[in-house]
Amino acid sequence: MAQGNSKMSKGVEAFILIEAKAGKALNVTRQVAKIKGVRASYAVTGPYDIIVHVEAPDFKSIAQLVVAKIQGLASIARTITCTVIETGQP
């Protein structure tokens, strides 16, 4: 797991499922972890290569983060954004 650099107060959270180009998953995991708003970046097994936990003040900021920062990386093939609507935490 690569830790992100954001320690924001609670806003909107989402998980980004990333499909990286062949052989690039570990490098992308580290690159994404450096982006402001990323709480954690995980290289995983399964249909996606990376799962990223992000947080931003609002939905528009999440969209901008995904489109401008994450999808802008050369080794990203595809992303799916899953917005958190409720947590099981008190």
Image (cartoon, rainbow, N blue to C red):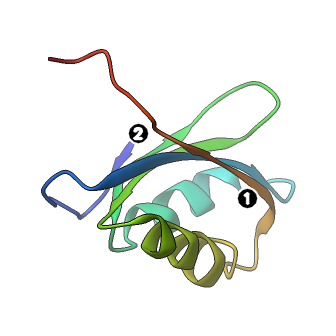
Q: What kind of residue is marked 1?
A: Lys
Q: Residue at x 33, y 24 (%)?
A: 87
Residue 69 position within the rendered picture, expressed as x and y whole percent measured from the top left: 55, 80
Whether residue 44 is situated above or below residue 25 in the rendered picture:
above
Where is residue 64? Give x, y as percent.
54, 79
Q: Earlier in the sequence, mark 2 or mark 1?
A: 2
Residue at image position (84%, 59%) is 21
- Relative depth, front residue between 58 and 79: 58
Residue beneath the point at 36% across and 54% down:
12
Say if mark 2 contacts mark 1, CB within 8 Å.
no
63 lies left or right of 14: right
The quadrant of the image that shows the C terminus is: top left
What SS does tag 1 mark? loop
Q: Is residue 50 left or right of residue 9?
A: right
Q: Which residue is mark 2?
A: 1
The answer to which image quadrant residue 9 occupies is bottom left
- Tag 2: Cα neighbours inside 10 Å, few (<14), some, or many (≥20)? some
- Which dot marks residue 24? 1
| Label 1 crowd (10 A; few <14 / some 14-19 / many >=20) | some
